[in-house]
Image (tube, rainbow, N blue to C red):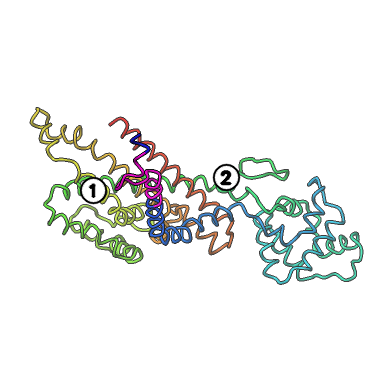
């Protein structure tokens, strides 16, 4: 009876109506919060996700042959890639080249084929400039004229390059970035020994990044510990000095290291003046100079995560361990250091990920054997204008970064579960 009279009693609302009002208020709160974050989400979408998606798409995109030679692609569909194709293929390629609007389209086609078959650039451009051939009325006559124009049209290598790249999408760029290739029939195989370069470059990139990360940890850990033990006022002042590299251009810092590390620089003069060496050391344009400059630039990225974690570790833990009979050194490594592992992992991951993408510092301070993967991405972008290969190498770096981040997440989750 009380439940049936409840809606009629004054001051008591309908429970269903109250539930709807609460749900509406919650939806409005979520909508308001989403509207506040929408500009940031749009910014991330336009400046981060869209470029990454474009990079991944261009790494497998192969539009040059499909766009420039549509009739030739159709004529080569039934070709077994042995010997020279039929006369219809010669007529088709002459028609396609003659229909190209300008030399830039022919140049893009020539560059793409030249990466597969050296010499294809001069073959395509020479034929493009000689077309149209008005007196070749039949496919057989066109074949004769093209062979007379350039006898290389009778070589299977160039026709295989066209047939191999007939599809608009290709795995060739990604395969090349890991020292693999497709043969003339499409089977995946290892590249020739003299062409297996990117595996060594990737290992060199990881090696340099690991060395830089190790030195940054060795230098940053005691400095972060010292800062965490200081009063807040002094720690803040000294932290400003740690952050100075953030406010200085990378080019300025690299130029400063060139002045310091050269044979007649301040470092060699100081070492000779202290009678530690007799002749100047080779500290520039080699691996040593690259590591020194990169450690200097990336050291704050190691110190900041360590400092934030160390400030949260109660100093009473260390004093308690010592009061229970442990030596100060053993208490530090057994009690204090394990509690800073999250900071070590975050700092090491941050420094390593930033290191594998470095370009300017190795390019200016390193030698030919000290260039990292980013250097070759820049080469393919600015010099050889091979966007597909540049994007494939960029995708390789992105994959390495994601794998490292996944490993870090797994390690930190296991540590938290054990804790």
Label 1 vs label 2, nearer the camera:
1
Q: Percent from the top left, x then y, of residue 112? A: 66, 58
- Nearest to N terminus: mark 1 or mark 2: 2
Q: Tell me: residue 194, above or below residue 256.
A: above
- Of residues 259 and 40, the one nearer the viewer is 40
Q: Quadrant of residue 234?
A: bottom left
Q: Which element type, helix, strand or loop, lies under badge 2?
A: loop
Q: Tell me: residue 186, above or below residue 242.
A: above
Q: Is residue 353 left or right of residue 136?
A: left
Q: Quadrant of the N terminus?
A: top left
Q: Percent from the top left, x then y, of residue 295? A: 31, 53
Q: Is residue 41 left or right of residue 133?
A: left
Q: Residue furthest left?
A: 323
Circle 2 is placed at which residue position? 179
Q: Which element type, helix, strand or loop, lies under badge 1?
A: helix
- Identify the main secondary structure in magenta: helix
For the residues labelled 1 and 2, the Cα–Cα distance comes to 42 Å
Q: Which residues are magenta?
A: 5-24
Q: Do tag 1 and tag 2 residues touch (Cβ < 8 Å)? A: no
**Residue located 38% across and 60% down the image:** 36
Q: Percent from the top left, x then y, of residue 353? A: 39, 49
Q: Percent from the top left, x then y, of residue 28? A: 39, 55
| The magenta stretch spans residue 7 | yes
Identify the mark at residue 308; answer none if there is no mark: 1
């Amino acid at each position: 009876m009380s439940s049936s009279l409840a809606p009629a009693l004054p001051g008591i609302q309908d429970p269903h109506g109250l539930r709807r009002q609460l749900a509406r208020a919650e939806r409005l709160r979520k909508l308001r919060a989403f509207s506040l974050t929408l500009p940031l989400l749009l910014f991330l979408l336009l400046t981060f996700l869209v470029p990454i998606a474009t990079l991944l798409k261009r790494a497998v995109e192969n539009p040059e042959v499909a766009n420039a030679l549509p009739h030739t692609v159709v004529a080569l569909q039934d070709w077994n890639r042995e010997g020279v194709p039929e006369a219809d293929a010669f007529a088709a390629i002459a028609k396609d080249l003659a229909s190209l609007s300008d030399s830039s389209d022919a140049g893009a086609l020539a560059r793409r084929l030249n990466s597969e078959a050296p010499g294809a650039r001069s073959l395509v451009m020479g034929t493009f400039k000689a077309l149209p051939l008005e007196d070749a009325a039949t496919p057989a006559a066109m074949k004769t004229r093209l062979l007379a124009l350039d006898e290389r049209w009778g070589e299977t290598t160039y026709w295989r390059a066209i047939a191999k790249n007939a599809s608009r999408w290709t795995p060739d760029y990604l395969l090349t970035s890991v020292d693999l290739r497709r043969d003339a029939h499409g089977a995946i195989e290892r590249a020739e020994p003299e062409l297996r370069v990117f595996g060594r470059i990737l290992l060199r990139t990881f090696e340099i990044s690991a060395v830089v990360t190790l030195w940054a940890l060795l230098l940053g850990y005691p400095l972060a510990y010292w800062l965490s033990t200081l009063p807040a006022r002094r720690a803040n002042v000294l932290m400003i000095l740690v952050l100075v590299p953030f406010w200085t251009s990378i080019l300025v810092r690299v130029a400063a290291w060139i002045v310091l590390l050269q044979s007649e620089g301040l470092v060699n003069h100081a070492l000779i003046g202290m009678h530690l060496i007799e002749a100047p050391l080779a500290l520039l344009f080699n691996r040593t100079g690259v590591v020194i400059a990169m450690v200097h630039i990336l050291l704050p990225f190691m110190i900041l995560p360590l400092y934030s974690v160390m400030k949260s570790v109660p100093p009473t833990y260390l004093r308690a361990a010592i009061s229970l009979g442990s030596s100060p050194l053993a208490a530090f490594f057994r009690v204090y250091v394990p509690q800073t592992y999250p900071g070590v992992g975050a700092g090491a991951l941050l420094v390593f990920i930033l290191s594998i993408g470095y370009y300017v510092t190795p390019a200016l301070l390193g030698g030919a054997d000290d260039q990292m993967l980013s250097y070759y991405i820049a080469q393919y972008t600015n010099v050889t204008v091979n966007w597909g290969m540049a994007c494939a190498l960029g995708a390789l770096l992105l994959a390495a970064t994601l794998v490292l981040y996944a490993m870090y997440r797994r390690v930190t989750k296991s540590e938290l579960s054990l804790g």
